[in-house]
Image (cartoon, rainbow, N blue to C red):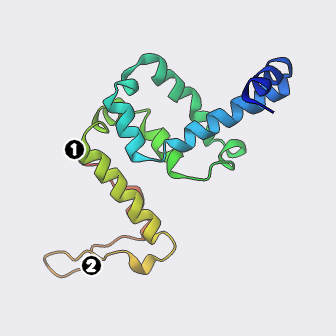
């Protein structure tokens, strides 16, 4: 079936139209897991457009259990939540932020199953200042 035939079928069959919309939105939400894509959107000024910001707000339904189960890249949901913040939408256009987000994502993938790979930080007085892996990931903040 060609793309035009699929579009015609989707226009006449509401179930097919819903499926096409579901797949399109799922693909877009999953693309948000890529820090380089977010950076590109910011540099093009797309993240500052009010209609796009409203669309991002609308897409928050993907965080619900019934929809989140289809997401293959969980960072997409985290980034979708971060994109609700105007400061993040502005800052992700900077190269440093893109690299920071990319490194955080890589570190998470590298260590999420093996807590022993998390680097333990030592304070100047020699005491262990590390946190449980779950607490450490929650307390991570983006650079100012």
Q: CB of mark 2 within 8 Å of CB of mark 1?
A: no
Tell me if I can see residue 69 in this picture: yes
| Nearer-the-camera pick, 79 or 14 | 14
Number of other residues with Cα within 10 Å of mark 1, as a class: few under 14, some 14 to 19, many 20 or more: few
Spatial CA distance of label 2 from label 1 is 26 Å
Residue 144: which disc? 1
Residue lying at 18% horizontally and 82% vertically, measured from the top left = 126
Residue 141 visible? The answer is no
- Residue 56: % across, % down: 51, 29
Judging from the image, what secondary structure is the residue with disc 1 in? loop
Residue pictured at 46% horizontal, 24% vertical: 53
Question: Reading the chain from its start, which is encountered first: label 2 or label 1?
Answer: 2
Specify the quadrant of the image occupied by residue 41: top left
Left or right: where does residue 4 sit relative to residue 54?
Answer: right
Mark 2 residue element: loop
Compared across the picture, whether 34 is left or right of 24 comes to left
The residue furthest front is: 2
In which quarter of the view is residue 50 placed? top left
Residue on which the image places disc 2: 128
Q: Position of residue 15 (x, y in %)?
A: 84, 28
Q: Residues within 10 Å of mark 2 (few under 14, many from 20)?
A: few
Question: How far from the left and from the top, in percent, is residue 36?
Answer: 38, 45
Name the quadrant of the C terminus: top left
Q: Does 92 sit left or right of 38 as displayed?
A: left
Q: How many marks?
A: 2
| Left or right: 94 as drawn, with respect to 135 | left
Q: Is residue 128 above or below residue 6?
A: below
Residue located at (18% from left, 74% from top):
123
- Which residue is at the front of the view, 75 or 63? 75
């Amino acid at each position: 079936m060609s793309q035009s035939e699929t579009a015609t079928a989707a226009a006449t069959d509401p179930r097919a139209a819903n499926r096409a919309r579901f797949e399109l939105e799922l693909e877009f939400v999953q693309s948000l897991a890529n820090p380089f894509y977010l950076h590109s959107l910011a540099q093009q000024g797309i993240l500052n457009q009010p209609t796009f910001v409203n669309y991002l707000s609308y897409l928050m339904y993907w965080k619900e259990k019934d929809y989140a189960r289809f997401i293959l890249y969980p960072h997409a949901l985290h980034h979708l939540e971060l994109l609700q913040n105007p400061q993040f939408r502005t800052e992700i256009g900077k190269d440093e932020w893109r690299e920071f987000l990319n490194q955080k994502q890589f570190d998470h993938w590298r260590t999420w199953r093996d807590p022993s790979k998390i680097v333990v930080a030592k304070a100047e007085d020699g005491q262990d200042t590390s946190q449980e892996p779950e607490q450490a990931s929650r307390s991570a903040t983006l650079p100012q």
